[in-house]
Each structure stands twice: as C-alpha cells, then as structure tokens.
Amino acid sequence: MSAGPVVLAAPAVETRTAARLSDWCILTKPGISAMTLVVTLAGYHLASGGHWSMPVVVAMLVGTALSGSGANALNMWLERDRDALMRRTANRPIPAGRISPRSALVFGLFLSVAGPAVLAVSVGSLPSLIAAVTIASYVLVYTPLKHVSSVNTLVGAVPGALPPLIGWSAASGTLDARAWGIFLILFFWQLPHFLAIAWRWREDYERGGYRMLTMGDPDGLRTARQVVLQTLALIAVSLLPAVQGLAGGLYAAGAVVLGLGFLFFGIGFAGDRTEARARRLFLASIVYLPVLLSILVIGRTRF
C-alpha cells in the first residue's frame, strides 16, 4: 500500500519539471532563436565558400543562440506589464506568474553576457561585437521605442538583420559589401513580415500601448501601402548577391520568382485588408526567407 503514492507521484513531478523547462524555453522565443541560427549559419557558409571549421561553427551557433535567447528574455522582462494586457501574450511565463521578474532578469542578463563572451573567446572579436550590438539595439533601443513611435518597426529590423553578419565575420574575420547585401535582404524582409503580424493583432497591440504603424490606420490603407513598397524594395535588394558576384543566374531567377510571389500576397492584402489576408501574407514571408537563402547557398559562386 505504501508504494502506491510514490509510483503515482513520479509522473506528476516529471510533468511539473517539463512544464517549468518549457516556460524557460518560451522566455527565449525559440522560434525566433531558431531562425536567427539559420541566417547566421547561412552567413557563415556564404563567406566561407562552404569550407567549414566545425569547432568555429559550433562555438558560433552556441554563442549566437545564447545572445539571441538573452535578448529575447530581457525583451519579455521589459514588456511583462504590457504583455499582461494583451490576449496574445497574457499567458507568457512572466505575466502569468510562472516565472518571477527577478529570475527572468537574471536569466536574460546571464545569457546576454555569456553569448558575446563565447563568441569572443572561441570565434573572434568582430562576431562578439556584432552580437553585443544586436542585444543592445534590440533591448535598449527597439523595445522601449515600441511604446513611443511607429518608427520602431524600422529600428527593430536592424538587430533582426545583424545575425548573418555574425556568421559572415566568423568565417572571414571582416565585413564587406556582400555581407551588407545580405543584411539588407533581412532588413527589408522583416518589414512586410512584421506588418502582417501588426495588422492581425492591431487591437491587441493598441490594448498593450504599443505604437505600431497600424494605429490610426482604421482602413489599413497606410499599412497596405507600406507592405507593397517594402516588398518591392525587398525584390530589388534580393538581387544584390547576383550583382555583387556572390551568386549567379540561378539565384537571380529564383529571387525574382520568389519576390513576385511574395508581392502577390502583399497586393492581395492591399486589396482586401482582412485578418485572413494578413495571415496569408505572414505565411508567405515565412516560406520566402528560408527558400531564398537556400537558393543563395546553392547558387553561390566561388570568390
């Protein structure tokens, strides 16, 4: 009889432990962190010509993952009170009370220091500096600006576009025009991507006090215009790797086809500014970037 409760309690303990670990994982925004690693690795591959140093790659991915996770945790810590006001974020670990603000702060600071430190020791000073700038611009500039001005979308696209430069500098020790071409692709891709999110959740963002472009735009015309314009800009900058000699005709053709496909969904949203159209635009953006990078990696020409 005495053994029964012990056997029954074990699964409950395991469940609580798994839930606790899941909350800490959520704090790092794993989806965003995973995408960050993909674009960082792409930057490394493009600069290295496919000649990888596995110790450098592993250290680069670890340092980048720690840096991105730390920045995301600090972002959640800073926005905990506003997250509590929004249906989309109210159940996040901090506003829901499953992780204390102090613990989240310590966790975020530790990761934000550890990430650049790993890069500095095992990869190089330039990748470490770029990681530190990414963290600082995301946490100290973009996050507070979200409550002040709709310009935050443009500013936030900067730290979002820096990770490929970590990979590029890890492979080459420097940055050149080709690296900045990839930066511009990531920068302009984020604008229609995020505007689709902002339109879908515009009421939630207003409830949380975030000053997005969608505020004061009840019919969505201003938002739709920016989606189309920024997607056109994305098509233009996506051709830079071909112009700069980083990739050839295969990539250029693929970039044009993908860009026009993305623009199709942007125009569709502009003509019918519904949440369904915004969701399709968002999904199109999720497909566009990894496919474009895959074609770039495959179509890369040697230096």
Image (cartoon, helix red, strand yellow):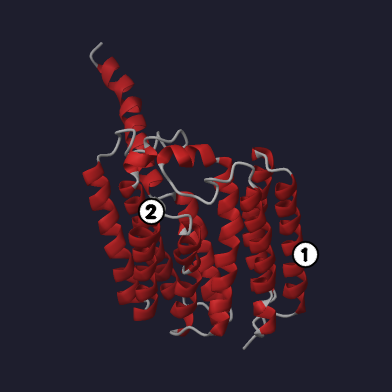
Q: Amino acid at mark 2?
A: Asn
Question: Which residue is rendered at x = 47% and y = 69% of the image?
Answer: 162
Identify the residue position indicated by label 1 in the image: 257
Q: Residue 140 at what x, y percent from top left? A: 33, 60
Identify the residue position indicated by label 2 in the image: 72
Relative height, residue 214 to residue 71 (above, below): above
Relative height, residue 188 to residue 276 (above, below): below
Camera-nearest residue between 244 and 272: 272
Q: Amino acid at mark 1?
A: Val
Q: Is residue 139 left or right of residue 149?
A: left
The residues tagged by marks 1 and 2 sit, at their Cα atoms, a distance apart of: 33 Å
Q: Residue 1 at what x, y percent from top left? A: 26, 10
Q: Are there few (<14), some (14-19), or many (20+) residues within 10 Å of tag 2? A: many
Question: Quadrant of the rendered structure where residue 149 is?
Answer: bottom left
Q: Residue 170 at what x, y percent from top left? A: 44, 78
Question: Quadrant of the rendered structure where residue 219 is?
Answer: top right
